[in-house]
Amino acid sequence: MKVTANVLLNYIRCRRYASLNDPDLDYTLSEYKLNSHDYYKDYIDMFYDIYFDDTLDIERNLKLSYDFHSDIQLQDKFHYYIEDRNELYYLMPTTSKDFLKLKYRVGKKKLQMFNKNKQGIYELKQENLTIIESNYLDKIKKLLTRTDDLGRTVYNYAFKMFLYNKVNPESNTKLYFVVLNSDYVYNGVNYTKDLYKVLDFSHLYKIYSEIIEADIYRMINHIELDDFTSCPLVKKECRKGDSFECKFVDFCFSHIPKYNSILNYFSSFRGFDEMTEAGIVNHDAYDLLNEGYVDILDLPISWLKDEHHLMQRYCAENEHVHLHKPKIKKILDTLKYPLIYLDFEASPCLLPRYKAEKPYSQSVFQYSIHIELEPGVLEKDGARHFEFIGKPNIDCRREIVENLIRICNEYNSSIIVYNKTFEMMRFRELQNVFPEYKEDIQKMIDRLFDLMDVVKTNKKLYIELGFSEEDAGRYNFYHHKLSGSYSLKKVISVFNESAYKNLNIQNGVQAYESFMGLENLEPTEYDNVIQDLLEYCKQDTYSMFEIIVGIKKLIAEWLQN
């Protein structure tokens, strides 16, 4: 069995993983799912071209393996090895942002955890501080926590170093992790050395080396146990809903309702408080799951102190539709016709592709627009629908901006979006790229209307509209079908359950992955995927129209009664 860092991290989640997993299916040397493998290859190759001196003798893609146990072979690779300097380099498809913003406190001062040395490498500071003086040790603990995103990167480093030292026990070679500079702005012509940041975690390896070995024996123990019986669900190990989710989550959570489980209570991660004679007892949501509290109705109602929780409970129990009618009516009255429904699709590409972009910039490649000239009248495929989709590896941003200005600025009316932070940020980025259109883009920004403010709330906005602070904080709309979520897909399911059912693309991640994969498709398949993308984006804007129509219908029924 071949074991990399990610394989090891998976096997030590819990004892059950080993019995469920087929090790022959582990994709051991491809640990990251990227929107384009070619961009990762470019990222690695460019580091060689930009960063190293041509006179150096550099070995590329060094692969190592070590037979740790009769059935366990540790295996991994290093992108570059410089024997003369005893240096190894491994490139991670992530950015420097979270590492370099990490700070610790000494008294009232905040200091960087990583400092750049004379060679330009960011080294972790080594401090001898007490807990009273500083929170330095807390930050170190974070980096040593494998269930933390940053800690998982350090764990990967430690595993690679552990493997290298097993193969070369007398070596004093140093390993550096290379990441993308989150502040790097591409000039649109050529990439420079500033694209990269080099990190040194060697101080932490001294602590981690024994942990890695212990974890390997723990993994072996889990494999030998081969215990299929269920085990407690643990949030930090199951990682349900995040980027390192266990691949057996659906199986292990199969006894928990997909809709309206206790995890669907708002802010369930904070747990639920029980008043006892000894004081307040906080019950962790995952502990409750393991104790058999799975349905949203299973919790004692006395544990629900939050008004929003009580609203959820009442709606689920009685299939009631909650409406804060005065708030909804007042905000809908602020809309200015014709209503322009707008949605962007964007790709967070590993490498910045076009001028003024940064690593993982959300590069807009598609939009859909529906324009509702008269209240309640709009055809999904009618003349008032406008759409655009670019081509991979062609900068279409100018065409997008000019189209948006032509279509949207024909009117001085409300532009409806859903969760407007995303669209606003894309507009701001386009202003930086095309300063000649800054004022025209600003006209669109100033008219953005967030539909989520209608169905959920926006405390500041509703206070400005004259509501009390208490009322402003209350949610405007809730239906048991939302199951604790205000995503566009969940909200539209209340008014049109079949909205997305027949689409081949179901969400934004599938959309940008499909777009980035277009370059590798045959013409017929290419055309099919383009059509799938257009249909998906079109449904997003039409869903917003359907939601407003549905909400208005509910308000009209209230007014009649």
Image (cartoon, rainbow, N blue to C red):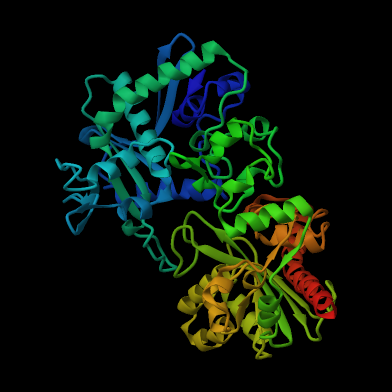
Q: Nearer the viewer, residue 39 or 415?
A: 415
Compared with 315, 165 (above or below) is: above
The quadrant the C terminus occupies is bottom right
- Is residue 511 something that shows in the picture? no
Q: Position of residue 51 (x, y in %)?
A: 31, 50
Residue in front for this viewpoint, 178 or 380: 380
Question: Where residue 425 appears, x then y in whole percent?
Answer: 51, 71
Question: Could one spot residue 106 in this view of the protein?
Answer: yes
Q: Is residue 342 above or below residue 363?
A: below
Above or below — where is 3 with respect to 97? above
Instruction: Tell me the residue at 67%/43% (across/down).
Output: 261
Locate residue 467, reporting x and y percent: 58, 80
Decide: is 503 above or below 4.
below
Residue at the outermost front position: 277
Q: Is residue 321 left or right of residue 238?
A: right
Residue 290 found in image quarter: top right
Decide which of 483, 274 is in the foreground and name it: 274
In this rendering, position of residue 38 left or right of residue 553: left
Q: How many marks?
A: 0
Lateral position of residue 318 relative to residue 117, left or right: right
